[in-house]
Amino acid sequence: MSEEGKILLQIEHMKKSFDGVEILKDISLSVREGEVVSIIGPSGSGKSTLLRCATMLETMDGGTLSYLSEKAAYEENGRCIYAPKAKLKEIHKNFGLVFQNFNLFPHYSVMKNITDAPVVVDKVPKKEAEERAEKLLAQLGLSDKADAYPCQLSGGQQQRVSIARALALQPKILFFDEPTSALDPELTGEVLKVIKELAREHMTMIIVTHEMQFARELSDRIIFMEQGIIQAEGTPEEIFHCENERVREFIGKFQS
């Protein structure tokens, strides 16, 4: 990852509450092109909410959200204002999201799961979308699964299909929300291998994960969140040798 990579994602003073309970408290971060950022922390710390607000599945209560310097949302007079729908549609093309529970359409084949959004949303010709999908399936070791349905696949295969679906839209940045948490331990490795390969290809990624060793090996930067706040941020070595006692305690639980 080049230190000179342009900033793809900029979040400033993001806030979010549910039923009066603050989930995100003044979160600010930026992610550069080619960078891999892992977000770790205990359950309930706001990690997934951060991803959902960054990808606009949830609306922010305050702060600024920008992709490639284009503002998707900003705060004015105590209110969060989003860009017009047409502009948001263009901004959405910059990112993809891989969910922990796959979120594949059960009544669609693997091929249709991957090609549906490019054809319907981006108006890519069907033949071109299918060729793109075939290349992705080959890359992810699923060439023989194009006509299969999600129920015929293992959890690891389903997650690889969901990664292919996200990549089919050719995003500049990929978000992963605990991509292995719904998998048996023996299937986790095949998904982590795919993500490592994407990192080698300089795909910009933000990954919420509990896989500590994976985060240490893969990340350019690790963020530790707790109680809706970024408590620590740094390189893997800085985080894994952090002077912050709470960070050491958290990581120690995964190393014991």
Image (cartoon, rainbow, N blue to C red):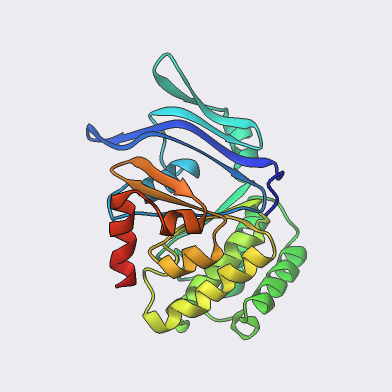
Quarter that holds the C terminus: bottom left
Residue 4 in the image: x percent, y percent? 72, 43
Q: Residue furthest top?
A: 77
Position of residue 21 in the picture relative to residue 243 (left or right): left
Residue 49 in the image: x percent, y percent? 37, 46
Q: How many marks?
A: 0
Q: Considering depth in this image, is 141 or 130 the residue closer to the camera? A: 141
Position of residue 112 in the picture relative to residue 190 (left or right): right
Q: Residue furthest left?
A: 20
Q: Can the viewer see residue 149 in this picture?
A: no
Residue 153 in the image: x percent, y percent? 47, 82
Report the residue at 57% width, 28% height from top.
84
Q: Residue 180 lies in what quarter of the image?
A: bottom left
Residue 104 in the image: x percent, y percent? 48, 66
Report the residue at 55% width, 81% height from top.
148
Instruction: From this view, report whether residue 79 is shown above or below residue 97.
Output: above
Report the residue at 70% width, 45% height from top.
5
Q: Considering depth in this image, is 48 or 37 the residue closer to the camera? A: 37
Quarter that holds the N terminus: bottom right
Position of residue 81 in the picture relative to residue 231 (left or right): right
Q: Considering depth in this image, is 39 or 244 the residue closer to the camera? A: 244
Report the residue at 45% width, 46% height from top.
233
Q: Considering depth in this image, is 98 or 223 the residue closer to the camera? A: 223
